[in-house]
Every structure is written in C-alpha cells, then in structure tokens.
Amino acid sequence: MQPSAQLVIIASGADAQGNNSAEGLIDLANSVLQDLVKEGTLYRDEYEQMAIPTYYRTTQEWKEPLTPGSAVKASALSLIHFEERVLPDPYFEQYQQNCDAEAFAEAYTGFFKAAFEPCLFVSLRDARMPQSRQEVIDLFLQRLQSGLAQNPERYSCRWFLQLMVIAKKAPPRIEVQSNRTLARQLFDSTFT
C-alpha cells in the first residue's frame, strides 16, 4: 500500500459472540448432508472433505490490529472510519408480507447455491460420473429447500456488514541540512 493511500473494506462480519446470523441455515445444510451420508447418496469421505471456507470477523477482530501497540500500527496503518450495519433480510421481509414459505425457501436455496455450491461440492469424488455428481447436488438443494420452507423464522439471516477505511500515513520527512564542516571531516578522514 502506497504512503497516503486509503483502502476501503466492506466485509460480512459477526457479532461480539462470533455469530454471523446464518448459523441456522448452515446447520440445516449440514443436517441435510449428514442425512445423505446415512442414506449412502453421499460418501463419508466426500462429506468429511466439505468446507465452506469463510470466517466472519467481529468488530474487535477488525479493529485490534489497528490499535496502538499492535505490529500493524507500527507500519503506519490507521483506521480512519469503522461502521457496522445489520442488513435487513429481504427474503424474510417478503415472507412476513405474504406468508409464502415456499417462495422464501426457493429464494434462500438460490442464494445458498450461488454462494456455497461450488466450494461445498468440489469434494465429490472424481470417479463420479457427471450425472451422479449433479444428482447429489440436486437432491441436496431439494432437501435444503424443503427444510427452509418448514420454518422460515429459524433460517432468516440478518448479515452484519462492516465498513472500514484504512489509511497508510506518509513517512515522516527527514530534513537534511548541509553541514560543510561535517562533510569536510568525513571526506578528509576517508581519503587522507
């Protein structure tokens, strides 16, 4: 980062206890995957390799490296602005208006598929035929959607959004004053 530069960060975060509000949704997905293992549709080794590689930082975890005494602070980075917002859940708000649990479930299933399907199902065995891979994914999404429709209140997500501006201070200017006597002494001691 260049001196005097500013970096804007917009990140999904967690509350002070480390919850990101999607725990219910992730627990449901995990339960569906475990059921697929019990049925033999998903192999245990495939399930054990599955991961959603995300970590949601708390406000403290974002701010701590930029506080006095931290190693990062010594490198001249500073937190110029920090703001946390809790986003509304548009799918749940729509459900509250129309009580259409199926539409809620369909919307969240689409979100889950777009956000997590690629990283979650990369662990399916290479030996699986493309049709078999797609059948596992489709069955998972079908059951996820069914579970979501049973209790929309439990699966609503109100994401924590953290907005930051981090700046790098310009290095201090060092002014060098000409000192002919010192320069002459250095020259003389070096070359004479």
Image: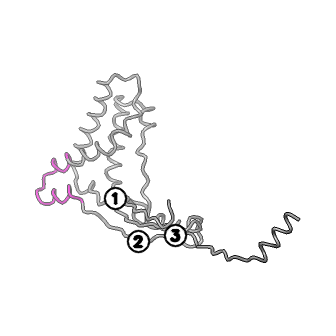
Name the amino acid, label 3: Lys
The quadrant in which the C terminus is found is bottom right
The numbered disc on residue 81 is 2
* Magenta stretch encompasses residue 40: no
Query: Which is more toward the observer, 66 or 151?
Result: 66
**Where does residue 29 sit, x and y in percent of width and height?**
33, 44
Marks 2/3: CA–CA distance: 14 Å
Q: Tag 3 or tag 1, which sits nearer the N-term? A: 1
Q: Residue furthest right?
A: 192
When the figure is inspected, residue 176 is found, relative to residue 12, above or below; the finding is: below
Q: What residue appears at the point 42 percent right and 39 percent down from the top-left corner?
A: 50
Q: Secondary structure at mark 2?
A: strand
Task: Specify whether 184 is left or right of 31.
Answer: right
Marks 1/2: CA–CA distance: 24 Å
Name the amino acid, label 2: His
Q: Secondary structure at mark 1?
A: loop
Q: What residue appears at the point 24 percent right and 44 percent down from the top-left corner?
A: 110
